[in-house]
Image (cartoon, helix red, strand yellow):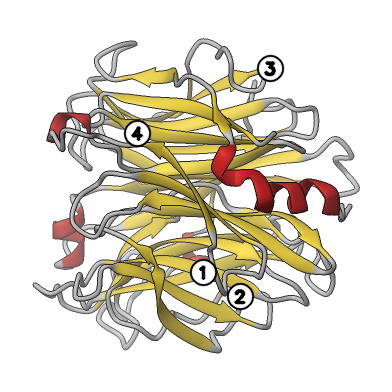
């Protein structure tokens, strides 16, 4: 159901700079619970109000490849306290990562909602996969009890990927030749408005062709389902070499914004790709000079609609050099401008051990947004609630 909550969002625009932050609550602490490192946060809220936070549980260290599980915790009190850890995906000594959760609210078979968790598995490091040595696959699991139990995994690799490995693609080095592959990171999304109401959409990226020292083999893209996960389709790739980790948000009239990391690093701002057909094709691609970025992840979220226009929240490390100055921004004009911002976390000494990094957003209620983010050189993933009085 589309909710037009004009009063809240008008107040949000006016009062963001005077918003109050809760104390940070540790959710995942590296070096505990059998994991030397936790990384790549993602969070969603179920219809019953439960928060489900996900992360990569890295068994042996902070490296992006190796023995990596997907783990979760749940909160029943808006993020003030969290449950014990649960393991959602365990590929033994191999990698499971890039959690991208979303709740399907429109499937009549599940009137209380069904939670999807999209994720990737890999059998080699990203650099080796980019050379053609190994493969990344795409899967999902679902839960109908708010993340307590999970279905068996479903492999959708052939629907949303062009893998160059012979067991998937006999042509191997065909014109597609996709190699590395990763969801988001952060939450996936579902369209609330017609004509694409109910569409599940996952932002993603891949590398294509031979590895490049300047990272021009990376391209952002998306994939989506219009039938509650029964089938999936790929979107066009964003036509800008170097576009990488991305996050998607619904705009008005069936439009979608993809907000991307620029892995090429020639411009230290976020890449924006706009679509007017539900994220299938890209009509405009540009760098947003209002959104500085140090080549890191960011997360965008549609938090409501005012007079038919989407109000957007965005969080990233608002610094063009370092992973620092984690900042929440708000746009009342669908990302054309970002006039209001609020500092979530900053390292005043610029000591690398205190830096922030990846983050995700969740709408808690009419006056609170939650931020789940990496802190202190990946020592913690913490949660803060932004109270907008």
N-terminal of the pair, mark 3 or mark 1, is 3
CB within 8 Å, label 4 to label 1: no
Decide which of tag 3 and tag 2 comes sooner along the chain: 3
Q: Is residue 141 visible?
A: no
Q: Nearest the camera: 148 or 41?
A: 41
Q: Earlier in the sequence, mark 2 or mark 1?
A: 1
The residue labelled by disc 3 is 76
Residue labelled with disc 1 = 258
Tell me the CA gap for discs 4 and 1.
Answer: 22 Å
Judging from the image, what secondary structure is the residue with disc 1 in? strand
Disc on res. 15 = none
Tell me if label 3 and label 4 are in contact, CB under 8 Å. Answer: no
CB-based contact (under 8 Å), mark 2 and mark 1: yes
> If you read the primary sequence from the N terminus, does the residue marked by circle 4 or circle 1 appear first?
1
Residue 319 left/right relative to 388: left
Which residue does the numbered mark 4 point to in the structure image?
374
* Earlier residue among tags 4 and 2: 2
> Of tags 2 and 1, which is closer to the observer?
1
Would residue 17 be found to the left or right of residue 123 on screen? right
Q: Is residue 122 left or right of residue 220?
A: left
**Point 75% across, 51% down: residue:** 9
Q: Which residue, given by chain and number where applicable, does mark 2 sit on?
A: 279
Seen from this angle, which residue lies furthest left? Answer: 213
Q: Is residue 144 above or below residue 15?
A: above
Instruction: Give the distance between the C-alpha atoms of the residues marked 4 and 2, in whole angstroms.
Output: 29 Å
Which one is in front, 304 or 65?
304
């Amino acid at each position: 159901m589309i909710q037009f909550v004009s009063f809240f969002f008008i107040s949000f625009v006016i009062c963001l700079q005077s918003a109050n932050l809760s104390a940070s609550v540790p959710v995942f602490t590296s070096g505990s619970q059998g994991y030397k490192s936790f990384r790549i946060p993602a969070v969603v809220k179920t219809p019953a109000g439960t928060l489900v936070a996900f992360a990569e549980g890295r068994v042996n260290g902070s490296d992006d490849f190796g023995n990596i599980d997907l783990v979760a915790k749940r909160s029943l009190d808006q993020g003030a306290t969290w449950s014990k850890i649960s393991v959602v995906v365990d590929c033994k000594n191999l990698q499971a990562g890039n959690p991208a959760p979303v709740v399907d609210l429109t499937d009549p078979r599940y009137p209380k909602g069904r939670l999807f968790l999209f994720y990737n598995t890999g059998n080699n490091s990203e650099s080796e996969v980019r050379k053609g040595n190994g493969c990344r696959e795409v899967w999902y699991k679902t839960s109908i009890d708010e993340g307590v139990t999970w279905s068996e995994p479903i492999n959708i690799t052939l629907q949303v990927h062009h893998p160059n490995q012979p067991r998937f693609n006999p042509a191997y080095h065909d014109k597609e030749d996709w190699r590395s592959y990763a969801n988001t990171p952060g939450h996936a999304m579902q369209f609330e408005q017609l004509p694409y109401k109910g569409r599940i959409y996952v932002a993603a990226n891949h590398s294509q062709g031979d590895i490049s020292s300047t990272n021009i083999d990376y391209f952002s893209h998306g994939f989506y389902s219009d039938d509650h996960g029964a089938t999936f389709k790929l979107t066009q790739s964003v036509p800008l070499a170097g576009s990488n980790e991305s996050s998607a948000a619904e705009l008005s009239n069936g439009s979608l914004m993809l907000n991307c990391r620029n892995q090429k690093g020639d411009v230290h701002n976020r890449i924006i790709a706009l679509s007017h057909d539900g994220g299938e094709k890209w009509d405009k691609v540009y760098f947003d000079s209002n959104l500085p970025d140090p080549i890191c992840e960011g997360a965008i979220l549609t938090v409501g609609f005012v007079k038919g226009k989407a109000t957007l929240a965005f969080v990233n490390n608002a610094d063009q050099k370092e992973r620092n100055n984690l900042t929440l921004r708000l746009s009342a004009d669908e990302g054309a401008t970002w006039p209001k911002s609020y500092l979530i976390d900053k390292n005043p000494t610029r000591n690398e051990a205190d830096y922030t990094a990846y983050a995700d957003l969740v709408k808690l209620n009419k006056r609170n947004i939650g931020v789940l983010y990496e802190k202190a050189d990946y020592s913690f993933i913490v949660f803060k609630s932004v109270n907008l009085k």
